[in-house]
Image: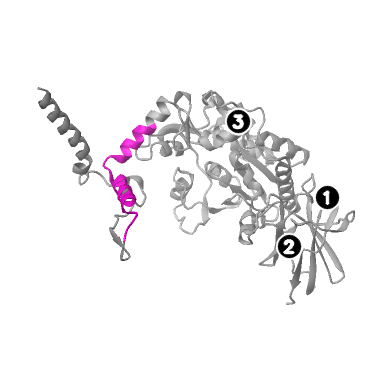
Amino acid sequence: MKKAFKIIYAAIFFGVCAAPLIAMPFAASNEQIEKRELAAKPKIIEDGKLNTDFSTQAEAWYNDRLPFRAKVLEGASLIKSEVFGAPVANVITGSDGWLFFEGSAADYMNTNALSDYRIEATAVTLELMEENVKGKGGKFLFVPMPNKAEVYDEHMPAYYIKAEENNYSRLLDKLKEHNVSVLDMKQVMRDNKEAGIYHKRDTHWNYLGALIGYNAIMDSLSHPHKTYDSASYNITNDWQGDLEKLLYPNDAGYDEQYRFDIEYEEFRFTMPPTAKDTKESLALFMSDKEENDMRIATRKATPIGAGSLYMARDSFGRALLPFMIDNYDTALFERRAAPNLNSVPQGGDMIFEIVERNLANITIMAPNMPAPQREITDYTGDYTAEGNKAFIKEESGGVQVYGTLDENFISDDARVYIQLTGNGRELTYEAFPIAEKELLEKEGESAEYGFSAHIKTGELPEGEYEIHIISNKMKSVSLETLRIKGE
């Protein structure tokens, strides 16, 4: 009896071990399911030599092709997230079926607090942007979008302790000091949360939340607009949330979506060139696919004097597209954290929308706009600081001057100026208090403090100009020489 039991046990054990190999020819391809390139089949001899990594490569090859691997991984994710409440694939499982992006937990607990200088630098950056737009006769509005956890915090796990203040609240206070036009969208969303304005299984608001947000934006701009208050809608169960897809990539479920029945005024897409079918293209740009939507431009078939809009946005902005398009004669939407203010037309409005968890990105790359000229006289000269360095990058119509700032040279108000001295002239421009991360890395530099300015050189006479930096009433020694060639 004991011998028979051992035989049966051994047969079952080897059968279980062999099952994956037996099932391999019949199982669906993991490459098709997971939509990625699987590990290549290893070779014993590679480049004429014995492959010393053969065992590791063979394990990776087999693991990638293990039958039902995706289902097993999804099962593990289900147990870890739903049973134990542990974050899986950057997803936090909350109560009542709510999912949250793990990347927003730092804002929730204020563990990613920006320095006072970075908050000040962000406010100065936005202030300079608004000055540029107003100088063209338009209106500017900064729209920070709240993380879902900040609106529906009652569904967050209890072990995530919500902080009383974070980067969002600190920046909002600072923007009021700088008189920057900003919409507190977090308060707008909290005031309307009972209507169910965020997806349960997605990081974003649904179309109802977007409609509420749109009206708040247009009210803040004092721009005449349709409210769509009487628009009918259906609630469908056909939205595949981004968090749902992260958690269950091979068998994602569906979330509810509000589908409004609105007749928009006739318009056409002027960008991208592939957007031929207006209705089909709009549905694609608004969908959960997020394809080919980096730069979108529209024009009304019959202008009604509704003006022009430039909107720098992220993924939250896609749900705003139809409302904004319907209420401006022309509109340009760019998906970028560093706006191009040269795209704002004369008299046009600008909206800068960015999600709360990405606020730090505002001071990583400077917006593209001509640096404003200033009159600065109360400073001391010949200040030497080891960390002050300047670099020049030629661009159409001028140059970009950027560099690093010594910690002892920066000012509390984050103001920094570039002065060009030469040919009997002394021209001063206000720069963005931003250390250009990517550009500085190419120069072999990295710095917490820096500056960046786009300077138009077309009106400057040919010759050489010394580049000085002014900050905190201190003027640096000449850091670099700008050479302007004649036409």
Is 466 positioned to the left or the right of 101 in the image? right
| Residue 283, position as x, y percentages in the image | 45, 45
Q: Nearer the viewer, residue 362 or 112?
A: 112
Quarter-of-image position of residue 168: top right
The answer to whether residue 157 is above or below residue 113 is above
Residue type at numbered disc 2: Ile
SS category of the residue bearing label 2: strand
Q: Quadrant of the C terminus?
A: bottom right
Q: Between tags 2 and 1, which lies in front?
A: 1
Residue at image position (75%, 37%) is: 176
Disc assigned to residue 225: none
SS category of the residue bearing label 3: helix
**Cβ–Cβ under 8 Å for marks 2 and 1:** no
Q: Which residues are the magenta region?
A: 50-77
Residue type at numbered disc 3: Met
**Cβ–Cβ under 8 Å for marks 2 and 3:** no
Q: Nearer the viewer, residue 205 or 271?
A: 205
Residue at image position (80%, 67%) is: 466
Residue at numbered disc 3: 109
Residue at numbered disc 2: 455
Residue type at numbered disc 1: Asn
Quarter-of-image position of residue 478: bottom right
Q: Earlier in the sequence, mark 2 or mark 3?
A: 3
| Residue 63, position as x, y percentages in the image | 31, 45
Q: Earlier in the sequence, mark 3 or mark 1?
A: 3
SS category of the residue bearing label 1: loop
